[in-house]
Image (spheres, rainbow, N blue to C red):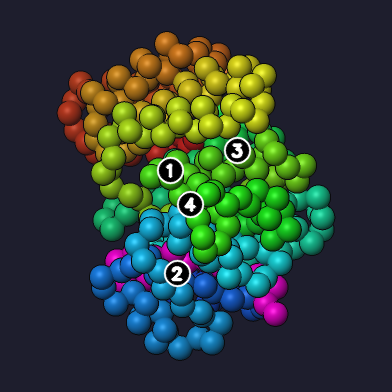
Amino acid sequence: MPRASIIVATHNSAQRLQETLRSLCAQSFPDFEIIVVDDGSADHSAELAEDFGDLRIRVLRQRTRGLPAARNTGIAAARGCLVGFCDAGDLWAPEKLAEHMALMQSAPSVGLSFSACDMIRDEGPRYSLWKTPRKRLYGAAAIFKRNPIGPVSTALFRRAALQRIAFRPPQETERDWWFDETFLQGEALELWLRFALVTDWEIAAIPRTLCSCRHAEPHTSVGKQLAAWERMVTKLSAQDRQFFGRYAAAARAYHLRHLARCAIASGDAPGAAQLLRGALVSSRRPLTEEPGRTLAICATSLFLSMTSIPLLSRLSRRHGRSA
């Protein structure tokens, strides 16, 4: 049995899937399986994975249910004691799996580990929306306010820990859920926070950039993204109302600040300014707790608005999201 399972969710991503598989097959820690879950692709993603020529790759097909569902299908089929994710288009550094394996072998109380990541686009330089973590361990409050884990491809779970948050909704007849498939976006943060709230497992960081995540061009309005975040809060508040009463306003402000940085990176100065105003209305915590970072984002938004030169968005990339 492999010691680790890496789940690759893909939907019509044949052009990028090969690069992802190449990065995974180059891992320095060799004892793993790759489970490619094709989410009803209309292209040749599944055939590409089947013909890749590495016996560690398994390919599963499902009707189109969304990438969270594809990850759940992969988790249900995983055989490794560690379970990680690398969505099609994302890349792992060769040493990523080895470093996670070493960390979790040395710390049996850690159920979820993550590394820093950078963002990649089809054109242009790589950049960061998440700051390299400075602490080793992170609790629920830090995850809620700043989401230091970031995209799903940064994380690996201990399989036994992941089972603690499995559930099966009444309409599901095939397998358990881990990611909430009813979330069209924000499903990763919902999973991270639910894990932190309902289990006793520790969440640990590796302070190195060990993966690169594909930048998703904006296709969902900020309003819908924020609505998904608010829905997460409503759903999880039942777990600990006191926790959400204490941290929700500040977490909302940090989330709006992060969305403002995304708007800056896309050259949307008016959108960034509106989001920053909303952040400060929700809570002054980002300004009092991280004045330098918050003011730098505000200044970049102002410069971009005054000059209308999208290239100024690169200034924001120097100020990674706080961890």
Q: Is residue 61 left or right of residue 35?
A: left
> Residue shown at 24%/35% (left/top)?
267
Q: Is residue 157 left or right of residue 90?
A: right
| Residue tagged 3 | 193
Q: Is residue 28 left or right of residue 16?
A: right
Residue 59, x across and y down, in percent: 46, 77
Dot 4 or dot 3, earlier in sequence: 4
- What's under tag 1, amino acid-wise? Phe
Tag 2's secondary structure? strand
Dot 1 or dot 3, earlier in sequence: 1
In the rendered structure, find residue 37 and report the number of the disc placed on it: 2
- What's under tag 2, amino acid-wise? Val
Q: Which residues are magenta?
A: 1-19
**Contact check, label 2 and label 4, Cβ < 8 Å:** no
Tag 3's secondary structure? helix
- CA separation in Å, label 2 and label 3: 25 Å
Dot 1 or dot 2, earlier in sequence: 2
Between disc 4 and disc 1, the foreground one is: 4
